[in-house]
Amino acid sequence: MNDCQQVFLAARPEGFPKLKDFGLRKASLREPDADEILVEIEFLSVDPYMRGHMQGGIYRTMKPLEIGDTLYGGAVGRVLRSRSPLVAEGEVVEGYLGWQSHATVRADSVRKIDATLAPISTALGILGMPGMTAYFGMTEVAKPRAGETVVVSAAAGAVGSTAAQIARILGCRVVGIAGGTTKTRHLTEDLRLHAGIDYKAAPDLHEALVAACPDKIDVYFDNVGGDTYDATTRWMNYGFRYIICGSIAEYSSEEAGIGPRHLKRFEVNRARMQGFGVAEYRPRYNEGIAQMAKWLNSGELHYRESISDGLETAPNAFIEMLQGKNTGKQLVRVKTS
Amino acid sequence: MNDCQQVFLAARPEGFPKLKDFGLRKASLREPDADEILVEIEFLSVDPYMRGHMQGGIYRTMKPLEIGDTLYGGAVGRVLRSRSPLVAEGEVVEGYLGWQSHATVRADSVRKIDATLAPISTALGILGMPGMTAYFGMTEVAKPRAGETVVVSAAAGAVGSTAAQIARILGCRVVGIAGGTTKTRHLTEDLRLHAGIDYKAAPDLHEALVAACPDKIDVYFDNVGGDTYDATTRWMNYGFRYIICGSIAEYSSEEAGIGPRHLKRFEVNRARMQGFGVAEYRPRYNEGIAQMAKWLNSGELHYRESISDGLETAPNAFIEMLQGKNTGKQLVRVKTS
């Protein structure tokens, strides 16, 4: 109980992260000072954005990660000790608590979780950052209208699966792109999308999109980057919106590929490409969570979690998630006893 | 007086248009029917968008051009005969009158020009479609704030020179990109931009932009397409806006190059890329012209015209404009006597 387990950055990855880029260590617990809380972490989230963070300071809102630092990341846990009036012992909180078994942080840096709403792990998934990314990205940035055709990449992932379902709920024709037959079946059977494209099996992604989108594409909600933009932008409708929500294909590559070429198509179709991140919407999480919980309870929204057991499995879970091996939200169960 | 001279599409160009893609012919004048006018054309405009139009129907708002059709294009002229109460004989009008000496068109398809405001040729340039493209593209789409850094490509061209000056009037630091020392000097001396970059002389366009834009780039107003996006997007600020106003570098090429790669920069900087065209703003031309005329009269706005004499010179003027040989607005004087 006096020990804290931590995963730290041992080396900056080159290309795909490897296990040797991570280290595991013990540290002593720090008791909370005034206005602080000590949290015992139950679940840890591994997310694509962390790949960029490992490289240094590419995100405005986050301190650059140095060699030897504990990995940064969202986590959910229970408050063991509190020296703040904001949070009581025993309450469940979510925040950027890091890849560790315990965290001592300011009480005003966490978000209290209503554990009666859904399992607390959802605070890292469909009712957390990835869910809010999907919700605000779709409803505030992409804004699809009923009847429009929406294409979502990484559609079996945490953000993509949620974004695609929200577009379906909004009355759109939704086509998901994922890798492998299992994931592609998941898109139509569990997520109830109109069509799923297995990019690993399709001989030509553009042709597959043409077949799946008879009315062309109005919104491309992209979590992948890489070459998919070429395949989608060649089939855009007038007023096309291209939401860059993630660029996982580029995170581990210094060599950026081709971009969305054919700018004359953007010009004549008055198309828009928009970079998006959820950080600015953090003050509106409650609004998003309320709507998402409603859809969850009515059965319109489906979610899946892949859970890896033990803090020491976090590096491997992270690497496999980057390689697309998970379906739905990838989590690490930190408190296994 | 009974003859009408016309330039017609003889063949669809492959790559850069050549003189043999155009033909010159005589046709007989058609007298106006009810609600029509007969216009004697004085100036004809050659614009980059026409290259796309020669290829077939890429513009929503225009009928595809067929082999044998008279070339489509903006022109200004004087009304010889009118059978409409809307326009009187002797009035000056502007409209899509085509590459010809005379046009018989519906009176409600043209715009009346106030010949006391400025020389009537400006109805095709700074007070016409290119000027309005610059005005609405800058003030309604790019919306630069005072103190921001704005980069404009093809900055010595009809649209670019105007867009760049509007950004300067709005209080921005403005850097223009053009080809050749004469044009680049024109940017700083006549247009009074903060810096000009000669892309033909700069060994590395990106490095030249870094040097010219110490506070990075907030707006890239692009009339060129091609590889300039790579050089500019690598130096974007948070909230970067990329206005695709033209893609002249792509008009004559089926082989689109690399696009604006590095999408993770778009993501983390919440950047936006927006295709734009002026067609939707046609109902607001009067508003734009009033503001532009004010800036012209106060001496804040400078314009230059390159004029080629004789309808038969139009194909060559068009080709040279596509090759960037003109400075300012390229016109053809149709009525030379």
Image: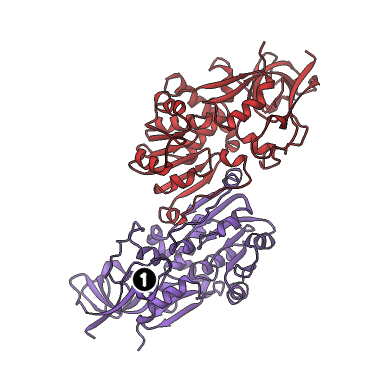
Chain colours: A red, B purple
Which image quarter: residue A51? top right
Which image quarter: residue B11? bottom left
Q: Position of residue B66 (x, y in %)?
A: 28, 65
Q: In this view, does B146 lie above or below B188?
A: above
User: How many residues crowd around disc 1 within 10 Å: few (fewer than 14), some, or many (20 or more)?
Assistant: some
Q: Where is residue B200 in the image (x, y as percent from the top left)?
A: 60, 69
Q: Split into 4 quadrants, where in the image is the N terminus of chain A?
A: top right
Q: Name the residue under label 1.
A: B74
- In front of the other: B95 or A177: A177
Residue B75 seen in the figure: yes
Q: Split into 4 quadrants, where in the image is the C terminus of chain A?
A: top right
Q: Which residue is drawn at 46% across and 36% down?
A: A199
| Amino acid type of the residue tagged 1 in the rendering | Gly
Q: Position of residue A310 (x, y in %)?
A: 67, 18
| Element carrying mark 1 | loop
A36 horizontally vs B181: left or right: right
A49 horizontally vs B160: left or right: right
Q: Where is residue B121 in the image (x, y as percent from the top left)?
A: 42, 77
List the single residue furthest toward the top.
Answer: A337
Q: Residue at x 47, y 55 (%)?
A: A263
List the single residue furthest toward the left.
Answer: B33
